[in-house]
């Protein structure tokens, strides 16, 4: 990697982080005990991961998780903090499996598969946190079922929004994504 490549990667990461934070302020739905459907706040992180790959995507996602905590702090336990912020957003970098190796082009289908896996990874992290730390909210219901349903109510719409928006902008962005 040369310096220019690193500077470009960092600059794009900063811009995508700022855009994700801005989009997160536009809430379509707010769940009563946490979680919300935003105006596609994960999209910049997902696109960054698709362009730059798995590792940079995980790092930027984790930084976004820290920033989300700073703006919307909900802290119960250190492990809950890691599951709900650092890990949950860090796994968005898994969308980087759609990242093409040098000389090849990013495939839309591969990128969408990466997005689905990444958001399912985020869902798993939140579900695990819900089962471990928030099981009392389930009442008589199985905590796993309760946590899956609760977290899916906002993450499935986020997944749909992300795929829809990325599919609409894929063609014009394809050249930018494929040119590092």
Image (tube, grey):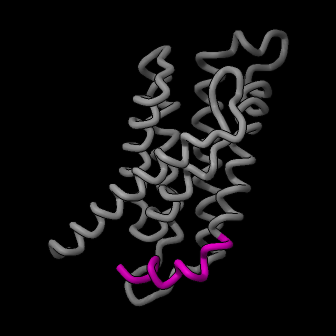
Q: Position of residue 60 (x, y in %)?
A: 38, 51
Q: Position of residue 152 (x, y in %)?
A: 74, 38
Q: Is residue 93 above or below residue 35?
A: below
Q: Is residue 134 above or below residue 69?
A: above
Instruction: Work out whether residue 42 or residue 101 is closer to the camera in this orientation and state it.
Output: 42
Q: Viewed as shown, does residue 164 lie left or right of 139?
A: left
Q: Quadrant of residue 129?
A: top right
Q: Position of residue 161 (x, y in %)?
A: 70, 56
Q: Is residue 169 magenta?
A: yes
Q: Residue furthest bottom?
A: 103
Q: Is residue 62 above or below residue 108?
A: above
Q: Viewed as shown, does residue 26 lie left or right of 90?
A: right
Which quadrant of the figure contains the N terminus?
bottom left
Residue at the (15%, 72%) spot, across then down: 3
Residue at the (61%, 29%) spot, across then down: 128
Residue at the (60%, 76%) spot, across then down: 170
Q: Report the span colored magenta.
A: 167-180
Instruction: Work out whether residue 62 or residue 29 is closer to the camera in this orientation and state it.
Output: 29
Residue at the (74%, 33%) spot, across then down: 148
Instruction: Work out whether residue 4 or residue 96 is closer to the camera in this orientation and state it.
Output: 4
Q: Residue furthest right?
A: 140
């Amino acid at each position: 990697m040369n310096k220019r490549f690193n500077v470009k990667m960092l600059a794009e990461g900063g811009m995508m982080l700022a855009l994700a934070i801005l989009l997160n302020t536009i809430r379509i739905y707010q769940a009563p005990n946490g979680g919300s459907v935003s105006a596609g706040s994960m999209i910049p992180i997902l696109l960054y991961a698709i362009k730059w790959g798995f590792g940079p995507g995980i790092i930027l996602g984790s930084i976004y998780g820290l920033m989300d905590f700073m703006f919307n702090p909900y802290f119960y336990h250190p492990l809950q903090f890691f599951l709900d912020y650092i890990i949950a957003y860090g796994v968005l970098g898994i969308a980087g499996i759609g990242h093409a190796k040098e000389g090849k082009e990013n495939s839309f289908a591969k990128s969408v598969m990466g997005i689905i896996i990444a958001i399912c990874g985020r869902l798993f992290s939140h579900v695990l946190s819900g089962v471990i730390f928030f099981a009392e909210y389930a009442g008589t219901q199985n905590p796993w079922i309760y946590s899956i349903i609760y977290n899916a109510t906002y993450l499935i719409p986020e997944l749909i929004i992300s795929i829809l928006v990325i599919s609409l902008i894929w063609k014009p962005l394809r050249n930018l994504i494929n040119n590092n």
